[in-house]
Image (tube, rainbow, N blue to C red):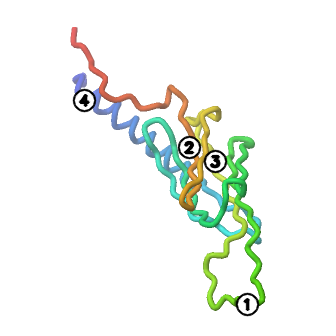
Amino acid sequence: MANFSELFDDFINKGMKDLNQSIKTVISKVENNTNKNAASASVNIVETGNSYRVEIAAPGFAKENFRLSIDNGIITIKGEKIMNQQNNTEQYLRQEFSVENFERSFNLPKAVDTNKIDASYREGILFVTLGKKDEFIQQSGININIQ
């Protein structure tokens, strides 16, 4: 018969392994939209204790240029803007940051509460926070009383 410590370690290790696998699955299912006219924006995905955060590099955009939607468990983030037209006195010699449109789609993990999604845009980064359902929020600092 296994002692309590071994059972507890097995429980924790299996739980962490399952959680890590879920996160890897979410990240591996990040998909670029098949729209060949849209560029791909760089993305970071971060997990905190109570949420996931998607960070999308989109310099030069305004918050009005973004559209977020959820359909069938997939969140789609679109950025659309009109580039400034050159005037007759200017000519670009090199132009590397000319992303006008992008679209990224991500499968939402089961842990996401779609009523807890917020977005903000600052300093060229779009931050989309996907809050977790209460039952998926990691608890810490729980004291266990021994009887």
Percent x, y for residue 6? 25, 29
**Residue position marked by numbered label 2 in the rendering:** 129
**Residue position marked by numbered label 3 in the rendering:** 107
**Residue position marked by numbered label 1 in the rendering:** 89
- Mark 1 element type: loop
Splitting the image into 4 quarters, where does residue 144 fall? top left
**Residue position marked by numbered label 4 in the rendering:** 6
- Left or right position of 83 against 8: right
N-term-proximal mark, 4 vs 2: 4
Residue under the point 61% across and 80% down = 96
Percent x, y for residue 43? 55, 60
Q: Calculate the distance from the C-alpha at mark 1 to the C-alpha at mark 2.
A: 43 Å
Q: Nearer the viewer, mark 2 or mark 3?
A: 2
Label placed on residue 106: none
- Mark 2 element type: strand
Q: Nearer the viewer, mark 4 or mark 1?
A: 1
Which amino acid type is marked by label 2?
A: Thr
Q: Calculate the distance from the C-alpha at mark 4 to the C-alpha at mark 3.
A: 35 Å
Residue under the point 51% across and 57% down = 44
Residue under the point 64% across and 35% down = 114
N-term-proximal mark, 4 vs 1: 4
Which amino acid type is marked by label 3?
A: Asn
Eyeballing the image, is 114 above or below 61? above
Around disc 4, counting alpha carbons within 10 Å, would you say few (fewer than 14), some (14 to 19), or many (20 or more)?
Answer: few
- Mark 4 element type: helix
Q: Nearer the viewer, mark 4 or mark 3?
A: 3
Viewer-proximal residue among 132 and 99: 99
Residue that protrudes farthest toward the front in the picture: 89
Q: Calculate the distance from the C-alpha at mark 1 to the C-alpha at mark 3.
A: 46 Å
Q: Nearer the viewer, mark 1 or mark 3?
A: 1
The quarter of the picture where the N terminus appears is top left
